Image (cartoon, grey):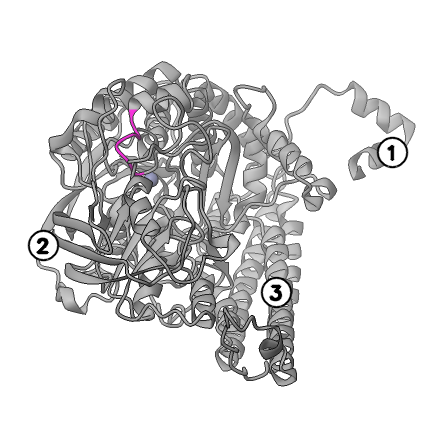
Amino acid sequence: MTHTFRVFALPAALLLTVAAAPLEDPPLRGFTTASAKVEREWESKFRAIPEPARMREAMRRLSLRPHHLGSPYGKDNAEWLRAQFASYGFDATIERFDVLFPTPITRVLELVAPTKFTARLDEPVVKEDPSTSQKSEQLPTYNAFSADGDVTAPLVYVNYGVPADYDLLERQGVSVKGAIVIARYGGSWRGIKPKVAYEHGAVGALIYSDPRDDGFGAGDTYPAGPYRPKDGVQRGSVLDMPVYPGDPLTPDVGAVPGVKRLDRKDAVTIMKIPVMPISYADAQPLLAALSGPVAPPAWRGGLPITYHVGPGAARVHLKLAFDWTLKPLYDVIAKLPGSTSPEEWVIRGNHHDGWVNGAEDPISGLVAELEEARALGELVKQGWRPKRTIVYAAWDGEEPALLGSTEWVEQHQVELRQKGVFYLNSDSNGRGMFGVDGSHSLERFVNEVARDIIDPETNAPVGARERASRIGGGNKEARTRGDLRIGALGSGSDFTPFLQHVGVPTLNVGFGGEDDGGIYHSIYDSFYWYTHFSDTTFVYGRALAQAAGTMIMRVAGADVLPEEFGNLTETARGYIVELKALRERTAEEIAELNRQIAEGVFAMVNDPRHPLTTPSVQASAPVLNFAPLDNASITLDSAAAKFERAYSSLPSSNAAAATLAQVNALLRQSDQVLMLPDGLPRRPWYRHSLYAPGLYTGYGVKTMPGVREAIEQKDWKLADAEIVRVSAALLRESDLVTRAAVLLEQAVTVRPIP
Ligand SMILES: [Zn+2]
């Protein structure tokens, strides 16, 4: 709207000039006009190279056999990947770490009362899908980093098993102390469920895939459709990664020979109780055996039974034992040296390990990354050289605990803090919208790339398509602004150590949303499934290679790193508004609860035959002092504006390379100065002041996490202290941006184009 208005406001003569001028490419963030022209030429050559047929063939090869961490085929894949990168002209090596990765020895689950039932714990072969029959190489269904254990106890159904579910159980007078809980997948990351169960005194936990959320309730089941069949199981890690990811025995250091390893009993991230994932076929007899109160409507799933909470007569025997030996891990690291700034690293990664055959997760993302690397190799043959060093990585051991990326980052952290300018991650890829989350200083950059990548099935620019989808979904902000906001990163893939431990500016990208299914972390995530139900023609694989490769080329070739701070400021301000609202809402809820208790509301509305206990009175919420955050955001705003004023002269300038190098040396620290010196409360490994996975949500992001979680936990003193720490981080950022602005101003005014 603004744009049209301005065109009409122009004098008629100028309007004619504009109309007569040839269509010019819009400027590229970080490039002078002259270097942008060269960059665009190389980029269009690049985007013509990736081939869907090669991605299909690479997926077939990489997902041919199970390739989890420590498996023979996982090692074979790593060696093949290394050879591929080398054949494209990269300097490719394998970096080995030895990490704790438990694999199952014993798995028993039985209902012992009031009736007998032994769980199957096995995913049957699907005859159409050849890789489902590779039984001897498949990891059985289990949760990695469960405790060993042999327990027999009453069963209690806890819905999703998040803290709020336990509040309701308590009011119903149901305790899980000494019980085995059964929770359904969803509502949180899986590792939160046994952690919260343990904190409430449970001795074991089962997690099942309810068909309402993940199975026939969502769509036709495999192999007729893409959804989870009745015996399908979601494997997965339950390591307490919101405390720290990576090898539980080597926090903050690489798991290399000779390193000091913790004793297993001292590793706080390992789950304290036995926990196992099961199918809905195995869950149904257990749930059906429960008595006690009928589950509230929101707790009921898609099985043809009455959902009870328990406990009652149902007793379950759960016995689990694991092989706790260290396993070898193989990261593939491939480098293309930079021409003028080899000391700056632009890093691209996707994991290569799967839970089983892992065609979608992670090979669909990895095959795009491979095609990018091949295309970059082709450009080098044609004479292209990146200014900065490009590092392509294929991580091992992502599934159990982000092991390969975390150990590599911890091992190279000093170097990464000096050299890392950008980390770009992908994981599973599919059909649909282009999704990007990450550092908000790169939001402008993302919008420029999203304008240049074309959606393969609709031929619209992926940014325009995403914007239309947001407008269609009722997002008011998408209607009122021309560019797209990017989301913040929590966890759930290999970007976490880069962004949240060492502060490398980071993005996570992928297509998805139009090819739903239910094969996640099962033997049915196979080449057959992917080529029948997902990006069957690999055109979205090609689009991912085009988008990610364009990002890598742009950052590796920019005169000035593409950071922009107005969007970061706006995002930070949005978080501050949210935090104030959260404090208000919490204070009102506490006041209303206390009032209802005082008025006897709970006693009066109680059904005497199904009584609920009255909750206890809570301390009222004090006022928090948000002034330091408000002031810091004002300071950051003016620093961002100063930087933009200096930046506006860059495209037409002939800026001095030496001064630009100084600007870049500051810009690559733009996430590092946002890191909290002592990390987050109770989890110092996580250091970013703006982004972290939630301590009680798992993958889901908490923004300004120190403050937000303190408010959520009603720890008001901590909230005030965290406000001061986050404000200090924003002021460090303001200082850095101001210094960069001063230098950039010098660089662009000293040498204007003659
Ligand atoms: Zn993955």
Q: Nearer the viewer, residue 435 or 333?
A: 435
User: Disc 3 or 2, which lies upstream in sequence?
Assistant: 2
Q: Is residue 22 above or below residue 304?
A: above
> Is residue 754 at all visible to an observer of this figure?
no
**Magenta highlight range:** 521-526
Q: Amino acid at mark 2?
A: Pro
Does 523 lie within the magenta span?
A: yes
Q: Amino acid at mark 1?
A: Leu
Quarter of the figure with residue 486 = top right
Residue pointed to by mark 3 = 576
Does 525 lie within the magenta span?
A: yes
Q: Amino acid at mark 3?
A: Ile
Task: Say the numbered circle drawn on residue 257.
Answer: 2
x then y, percent, for residue 309: 40, 59
Q: Is residue 595 above or below residue 731?
A: below
x then y, percent, for residue 348: 36, 38
Residue pointed to by mark 1 = 10
Q: Residue furthest front?
A: 609
> Is residue 425 at all visible to an observer of this figure?
yes
Q: Is residue 256 above or below residue 581?
A: above
Q: Nearer the viewer, residue 20 or 482?
A: 482
The local secondary structure at tag 3 comes to: helix
State the separation of the CA atoms marked 3 and 2.
Answer: 45 Å
User: Disc 2 or 1, which lies upstream in sequence?
Assistant: 1
Q: Nearer the viewer, residue 128 or 709?
A: 128
The local secondary structure at tag 1 comes to: loop
